[in-house]
Image (tube, rainbow, N blue to C red):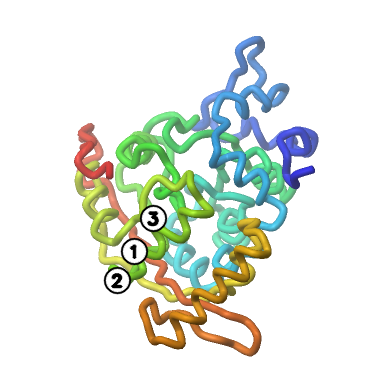
Amino acid sequence: MCIGTPRRGRQQFQRPFCLDDLGSLQRLAGPEQGDCCARPEWIYREIGSNVSSHFDNRSRDYNSADWVNDIELLMRIREAVSPLRGGILLDVGGGTGAVASYLSATVPGLRVVNLDSSLGMCSISAAKNLRSVVANAESLPVHGNSVDVVILRQVLHYVTSVPAVLAECRRVLRAGGLLIIGQFVPVDVWENILIGGVLRRWQPWRKRTCTVGSIESALRANGFSPHPKATLTVDHSFGAWLSRHHVSAPMRFAANGFVAMMMRLHLPPLRFYRAGSDLRFKTEFILVIANLANPHSTGASDQVER
């Protein structure tokens, strides 16, 4: 049986689903009754997708990914939101609640909501006593002009429409609110080929490869004014990455051999290295913080949807 299956998630999911104590959240009503807490499986069927199913299956080992609890990444986000004590923060695509848990513990008075399309992820988040909602980034169950911060960390490459997601962020943010985007990006054309090709072999539901330019262009085209980005280097275990994505043993052997050959021949990308018996690689993670350029603007542009 797959870990983190919908059935197991429904059994574990508890009261935080409804969030009645936060008036900005709309009530998520099922088709037969008006109590979202009673029927979270209706929401799961409504938004179920290859992406949410994938992360249901990964929910139990999701925190083993090197970047999820990277303390430098979490501290950078805390620095950006710490002045907003007493505000409401919505972490869209927040997974098992790594960001929500950290910010709840380190920013006094900040009310944090963890939102994810995966019921398995939200079940784990809710078990940490975090306010957790199962919903889609393109249709946030939140009233307009009601949230102080929205975070999108490793989200944009999975969504169907980037403009639709940014339009929802613009809708729910209060005037002066912040949008924080965190995303792994390729540093050159070779990494772009690697991410767009090799990774898509094991993540066929990925919709796009995000670059710094595409993110900043999308923000400007959809009513946001981005600040200068912050760039961090994150270190990963290649073997652990392959295992988390359930790559078969023969394919893991082939992938390790291919990378080792490229290293011997000094072919790009050169960001792989050996640490003892472990093959590791480095990637660039950017944080872009943006304000609403015009809180009353409505225009989202499809020109950035690629």
Residue 23 in the image: x percent, y percent?
Answer: 53, 31
For disc 3, the marked residue is 181
Query: Which one is closest to the eye, mark 2 or mark 3?
Result: 2
Under mark 2, the amino acid is Asp
Per the image, label 3 sits on a secondary structure element best described as strand
Per the image, label 1 sits on a secondary structure element best described as helix
Is mark 1 in CB contact (under 8 Å) with mark 2? yes
Residue 11 in the image: x percent, y percent?
Answer: 80, 34
Under mark 1, the amino acid is Asn
Lateral position of residue 258 relative to residue 40, left or right = left
Residue 51 numbered tag: none
Is mark 2 in CB contact (under 8 Å) with mark 3? no
The Cα atoms of the two marked residues, 3 and 1, are separated by 19 Å
Looking at the image, residue 182 lies above or below residue 168: below
For disc 2, the marked residue is 188
The Cα atoms of the two marked residues, 1 and 2, are separated by 6 Å
- Which comes sooner in the sequence, label 3 or label 1? 3
In percent of the image, x 66 and y 47: which residue is there? 130
Residue 287 in the image: x percent, y percent?
Answer: 38, 63
Looking at the image, residue 201 lies above or below residue 49: below
For disc 1, the marked residue is 192
In percent of the image, x 44 and y 80: which residue is there? 262
